Every structure is written in C-alpha cells, then in structure tokens.
Amino acid sequence: MPLATVHPDRPARRTVRGLLPVAGALIAAQLALAGCTTSSGVDRGTTGSVGKPMTSSDFQQQESYWNSRYARDPASKENALNFAAALLRTGNSDQAVAVLQKAAIRYPRDRQVLAAYGKALAADGQLEQALGAVRRAQTPDQPDWRLLSAEGTILDQMGEADAARALYQKALALKPNDPMVLSNLGMSYVLTDQLPQAEQVLRIAVVQPGADSRVRQNLALVVGLQGRFQEAQQIARAELSPQQAEENVAYLQAMLANRAKTAATKTAAAKKPVPAQAQAMPPLPSG
C-alpha cells in the first residue's frame, strides 16, 4: 500500500505500516498508483516494474536517491517528476506540490508535468485545482489512460463515484487489465462500502504483471475490512514482517470494533422514544 496520505482540510495523519488509514486516505492508494509516469528515464516503480515487490523501505531509498538528483539539477524534468513521485509515496504531498509547481512553470505545456502536478494537488487535498490541471493535460482526441485514471481518483475523492468509475472503464478500454487502474477501481468500491465488489476487482489486479506491493496491500486491507483478519494477515505477510502484519491486523480490528460501537450507538439512539411534547396550558378566562 502507498504511504502517501490525503488530507482534505488537513486532518491528523494516521498510517499503519504497509496499510493505508481508512476513510479519506483510501484515496491515497489511488493517487500513488495513478502517479506513475512513463517516458524515457522516468521511474516506473509505482507500477511494480522492478523485479521484486516494492516495500516502504524501497520507497524511502527512492526518495533519498531522487532528492540528491533533484538537488544537483532541479531544472531537470526527469528529476522533478521522480522526486515528486517518491515524495508522494512517502506521504510528503505538500513538498511534492512545491516541486511540481516549479516544474509546471518551467514546462507550462508539458502533459506529463501537468498530469503529475494535478495528482500531487489531489494528494494534498486541493481537489478543484487538481481536476483543472489533469483536465488541461488531457487531449480528448487522443486520451491518455493514465490521465483518465488520475481524473477518476480525484472525482472519487469529491464523492462522484459513478463518474470516477466510468473513467476507470475508459482507461481499461485503452489499457486492459492494468493493475494501477484496477486497483483504483477496487478502492473506489471501498469508498462506497461495496467491499465484495472491491475484493473481486483487487483479486484480478494482484495477478496482473506489474502489480506491486501496494496493490497487494490494498487487497489485504479490503479482506481485513470484511473481518477476515487471518487471511488479511497472510496476504500482508507476503511482503511485511510478521510484526508489521500483526500491527496492521490489530489496527483493522480496533477500527472495526469502533465502527460497530458507533453503529450500535446510533441504533440505540434511533430506538430511544422521544418524550411527548408538553401540552400547552389553556388560556386563562378573561374578566
């Protein structure tokens, strides 16, 4: 799972190793996956093109590497895109926005830069600006499937699930079975509490070539949200240490217990009889 944290109105950040915090940060799974860029010299680590599964340690190493490259040559498009992508994966969306804002000034008509800038804005909770940037980068006559997917993640965060899923389907028509797009679609179902549908899509995503650690951890999250903690732990343990996997499951159990408690409280409040309104005193006779 990605480590980037979406924070609309900047709520406190809460992450679990390898798993995203539930609620708004589920979108971060989409944004970090949607954030890959593809051109010569640009890192494709977000889609798992490396030979082994990407882990949080890999993401930290990538951030350090691209940080040094960017410091030496901040005008390089390659350095800016890769450093920003690495920052998003480690939860530093505000810094990613700053890096890409400078790149967008240097490359005002570059679709790749504008797309990355839009995704970073979305990860930072600046949704309207993000939507505008991604749509400006798109060309209707030759749509880019990555931009369609990125726009979908932004619409998901804005609560427009149907419109988002339509864009994912368009992206999949252009790039069938892409694990990035499938993962975004799966997490879209999580956001509307359609967990069986989410699991079905994510199980397709994890077996696709290029599916990385975060796609598998998204599946672990969805399985855990349905109360199948042992199975979720087994999925997580494929890439996390036993301690990290146990911490993730403990977090899921606590979250679901709190969810059940909240639901029970609401049910009890709904069943509580409303006291009858006191009858008004009749008017006193005059005279």
Image (cartoon, helix red, strand yellow):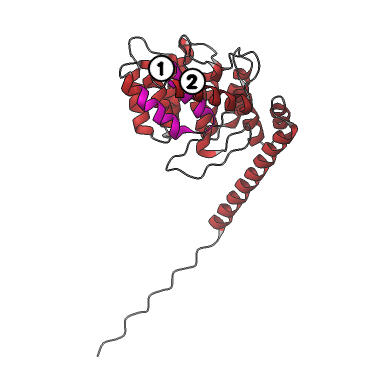
Quadrant of image for the C terminus: bottom left
| Residue that label 2 marks | 69
Sequence-wise, which precedes: disc 2 or disc 1? Answer: 2
Q: Secondary structure at mark 1?
A: loop
Q: Nearer the viewer, residue 36 or 178?
A: 36
Q: Going by the picture, which residue comes out furthest to the bottom? A: 287
Q: Nearer the viewer, residue 74 or 182?
A: 74
- The part of the image, by quadrant, that contains residue 177 is top right
Q: Nearer the viewer, residue 283 or 231?
A: 231
Q: Residues within 10 Å of mark 2 (few under 14, many from 20)?
A: some
The CA distance from mark 2 to mark 1 is 9 Å
Q: What span is in magenta?
A: 77-103
- The part of the image, by quadrant, that contains residue 120 is top left
Q: Position of residue 195 (x, y in %)?
A: 59, 31
Secondary structure mostly taken by the magenta-highlighted segment of the chain? helix
Q: Is residue 164 above or below residue 141?
A: below
Q: Amino acid at mark 2?
A: Arg
Q: Going by the picture, which residue comes out furthest to the front? A: 72
> Horizontally, is 182 left or right of 104 in the view?
right
Q: Residues within 10 Å of mark 1 (few under 14, many from 20)?
A: few
The numbered mark at residue 76 is: 1
| Residue at x 38% of width, y 75% of height | 280
Q: Secondary structure at mark 2?
A: helix
Query: In this view of the protein, can residue 59 be seen by the observer?
Result: yes
Q: Amino acid at mark 1?
A: Ser
